[in-house]
Image (cartoon, grey):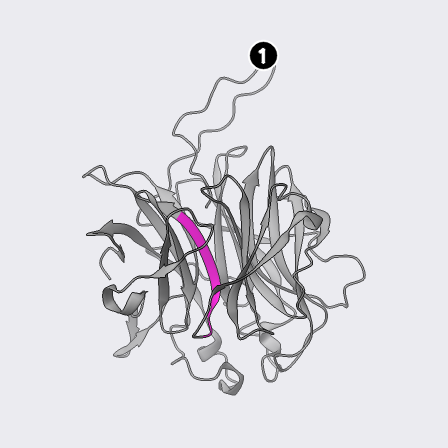
Amino acid sequence: MHQQPAATVAIPPFGRAPLPHLLPLRADTFSVPYRDPVWDGPTDPVLVADHLKGEWVLFYTQRRATKPGLTGVEWVHGTAIGVARSSDGGATWNYQGTADGLIPPETERPATLWAPDVVRIGDQWIMYLTVLGGVRTDWTGSASVVQFASPDLEAWEYLGQIDLDSPRVIDAAVARCGDGRYRLWYKDEARGSNTYSAVSDRPQDPSSWVLEGLTIPGRPHEGPKVFRLEGHYWMIVDEWRGQAIYRSADATGNWTRQEHRGGLILTAPESVEGRPVVGRHADVVPLAPGEDGRERALLVYFTHPYWGGEDIGAMDAEPRPRLSHVRAAVLEVRNGNLVCSGH
């Protein structure tokens, strides 16, 4: 999970300008949902602290929801990674365009980029990104997870592809675990659309990842995210009916599903015309403690407010069901259960 920087920064070495002040992330971030100003289809959000500019950065899959003339799931392909920034702790967001330099060499153009995860490791940021070559009208084609490095969250250097021994892997998430090692969790669509993991002591090196195997079996799902809150490690995965919750002592394995409310959160964070809308593929970022001193986190997710969740391939061709936006909720641990405040 991304570490929230302190409210103050150290005095820089002589001759260097002081770093700008980064305002703490607000608990009411995205109370006004974020909408992509180009195609109105932001999904798979990830929120990163940029201590160099004193801003919060939102990366997301820029689905082409309103582009005319696309058939099948073509609008979910050919996607770039959208970028928005906030200098006021998340109260307002300014669209910055799309991230450059994220298409690996020899990738079929136009490329499809999905679901970035961005983690601060050492003195740089590492992005783990899903890449598919070309644009398709159905869910075919190879998909892989690749790595990039950046000193500033703007210029990205390609590091290479991670060998995960599968023709179709997506939705990478990386975190440091209780054993001090880094793990990468991902959806393997060639193996039941379950969550698998790999482990590394050198997560900057794509060749360093060693496969561990199946992590979360059973019902198909996607979008894993691992974080620490109130002394436990938690994993959420998107079951397309809400986020399923698992807990582990050290995130190295032995994940146990939460029993409270069927192990699900964000089953209906909003409603449209009396219909519940579920929260989808999410990120988790630390917040300042609440008034009671307990740890909190911000759960950043997206919804399709005008789509009932049926087969996406059969979605009506008119743009409205394809629209999505980014929202957030506050996560807390109550009576040993992970819950969303107000949901």
315 and 115: which is toward the camera:
115
Q: Position of residue 272 (x, y in %)?
A: 30, 75
What is the chief secondary structure element of the magenta stretch? strand
Q: Which residue is painted at 45% across and 62% down in the image?
A: 35
Quadrant housing the C terminus: bottom left
Query: Which amino acid is tagged 1?
Result: Phe
Q: Which residue is mark 1?
A: 14
Q: Can you see residue 91?
A: no
Q: Is residue 151 left or right of residue 218?
A: right
97 and 334: which is toward the camera:
334
Q: Position of residue 291 (x, y in %)?
A: 20, 38
- The answer to whether residue 85 is above or below residue 329 is above
Judged from the image, the secondary structure of the residue bearing numbered disc 1 is loop
Which quarter of the figure has residue 73?
bottom right
Q: Is residue 229 left or right of residue 134?
A: left
- The answer to whether residue 1 is above or below residue 238 is above
- The answer to whether residue 337 is above or below residue 228 is below
336 and 327: which is toward the camera:
336
**For the magenta stretch, what is the residue range?**
220-227
